[in-house]
Image (cartoon, grey):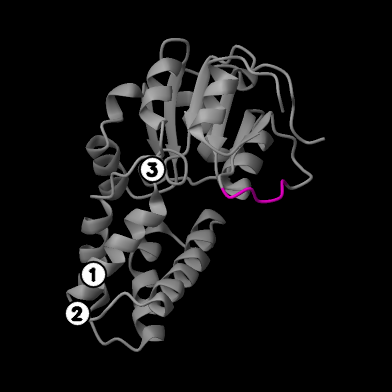
C-alpha cells in the first residue's frame, strides 16, 4: 500500500496548499475569466474556459519546473491564450483584470475554517502555495484565514516554487527549522505538493476530492477526499485508511 492506516503522528507543523485545499480555485478562476472576457464583450464559453485552463496549466508547469520565470508567466499565459482564442486585446490589461478578479476569489472548501481552528489548538499551521502575492494574500485575508496561520509562504515571495527542494528548505527555515519528519503537508497536486514534500523528508497527505487513482509512489500517510475526513484523522484520531 502507499498510504498508512495508523493514527496521525504528533506533527509539530501542518502545512496546507492554498488552491484546491483551502480555497476553491476552480470557482475563482471561472469568475475571474468571465469578468476579464466580459470587459471585452466576450462570453466565457466552455471552449474558452477549456482553452485557458490548457494554456495556464502548460505554462504553470513550466514555471514549477524552472523552465520560465514568474515574470514571464505573468504575461505569457494571457498572451498565448488571447492569441489562440483569436481575441485582439492587450495582454497586460487582460491580465490585470483577470488577476484583480481572481484576488477576490474567497470561496473555502466546506469545513475548512472549522477544522483549522481545531488543529491550531494542537499544531503550528502554515500555508505553502505556488502563486502570486497580489492574488494569494488578498484571497487568504478575504476568506478570514490569515489569523489562523503562523506562517504564509508564497512562491513568488521566496523565489522558488514547489516541487523544488529549495521551496521546502526555505519554508522549513521560515518555520524555525523543525525536523522534516515533524512536518505534514496537505496538498492536492501529486507532483508539486506530495512528491516535492516527500523528497524533502516531509510526510504528506493527499487531498483528493475527485477520487483520482493514487500513484504508486511516493508513499503518503493518508489520502482524504474532504475536510471531514481530514478532521477524522488529525483531530479525532480515526485509524481507518
Please state if 35 lies on the left or on the right of 84 as rendered.
Answer: left
- CA–CA distance in space, label 2 to label 1: 7 Å
Per the model, the C-alpha gap separating discs 3 and 1 is 20 Å
Q: Which residue is mark 1?
A: 36
Q: Residue at x 60, y 11 (%)?
A: 10
Question: Residue at horizontal 24%, vertical 42%?
Answer: 138
* Vertical arrangement, residue 160 with respect to residue 227, above or below: below
Magenta segment includes 213: yes
- The C terminus appears in which quarter of the rendering? top right
Q: Which mark is residue 23?
A: 3
Q: Nearer the viewer, residue 8 or 60?
A: 8
Cβ atoms at labels 2 and 1 below 8 Å apart: yes
Q: Nearer the viewer, residue 96 or 122?
A: 122
The residue under the point 62% across, 22% down is 180
* Residue 80, picture quadrant: bottom left
Residue 146 forms part of the magenta stretch = no
Q: Secondary structure at mark 2?
A: loop
Badge 1 crowding class, 10 Å Cα cut-off, few under 14, some 14 to 19, many 20 or more, is many
Which SS does the magenta portion mostly show?
loop
For label 2, the residue is 40
Question: Total marks drawn?
Answer: 3
Lower position in the chain sequence, tag 3 or tag 1? 3
Query: Does 146 appear above or below 69?
Result: above
Circle 3 — which element?
Answer: loop
Q: Is residue 20 visible?
A: yes
Whether tag 3 and tag 1 are in contact, CB under 8 A, the answer is no
Position of residue 78 measured from the top left corner of the image (x, y, whole percent): 34, 72
Q: Picture coordinates of residue 36 (x, y %)?
A: 23, 69
The residue stretch that appears in magenta: 210-214
Label 2 – label 3 distance at C-alpha: 27 Å
Q: Is residue 39 left or right of residue 189?
A: left
Amino acid at each position: 500500500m502507499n498510504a498508512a492506516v495508523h493514527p496521525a503522528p504528533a506533527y509539530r507543523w501542518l502545512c496546507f496548499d492554498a488552491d484546491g485545499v483551502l480555497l476553491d480555485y476552480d470557482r475563482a478562476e471561472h469568475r475571474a475569466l468571465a469578468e476579464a472576457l466580459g470587459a471585452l464583450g466576450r462570453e466565457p464559453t466552455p471552449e474558452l474556459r477549456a482553452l485557458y485552463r490548457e494554456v495556464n496549466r502548460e505554462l504553470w508547469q513550466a514555471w514549477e519546473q524552472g523552465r520560465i520565470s514568474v515574470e514571464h508567466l505573468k504575461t505569457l499565459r494571457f498572451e498565448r491564450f488571447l492569441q489562440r482564442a483569436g481575441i485582439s486585446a492587450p495582454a497586460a490589461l487582460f491580465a490585470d483584470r483577470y488577476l484583480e478578479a481572481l484576488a477576490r476569489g474567497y470561496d473555502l472548501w466546506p469545513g475548512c475554517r472549522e477544522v483549522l481552528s481545531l488543529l491550531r489548538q494542537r499544531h503550528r499551521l502554515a500555508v505553502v502555495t505556488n502563486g502570486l502575492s497580489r492574488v494569494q494574500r488578498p484571497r487568504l485575508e478575504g476568506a478570514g484565514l490569515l489569523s489562523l496561520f503562523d506562517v504564509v509562504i508564497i512562491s513568488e515571495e521566496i523565489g522558488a516554487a514547489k516541487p523544488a527542494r529549495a521551496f521546502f528548505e526555505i519554508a522549513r527555515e521560515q518555520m524555525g527549522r523543525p525536523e522534516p519528519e515533524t512536518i505534514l503537508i496537505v496538498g492536492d497536486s501529486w507532483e508539486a505538493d506530495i512528491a516535492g514534500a516527500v523528497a524533502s523528508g516531509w510526510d504528506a497527505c493527499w487531498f483528493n476530492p475527485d477520487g483520482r487513482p493514487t500513484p504508486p509512489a511516493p508513499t503518503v500517510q493518508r489520502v482524504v477526499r474532504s475536510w471531514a475526513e481530514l478532521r477524522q484523522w488529525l483531530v479525532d484520531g480515526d485509524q481507518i485508511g
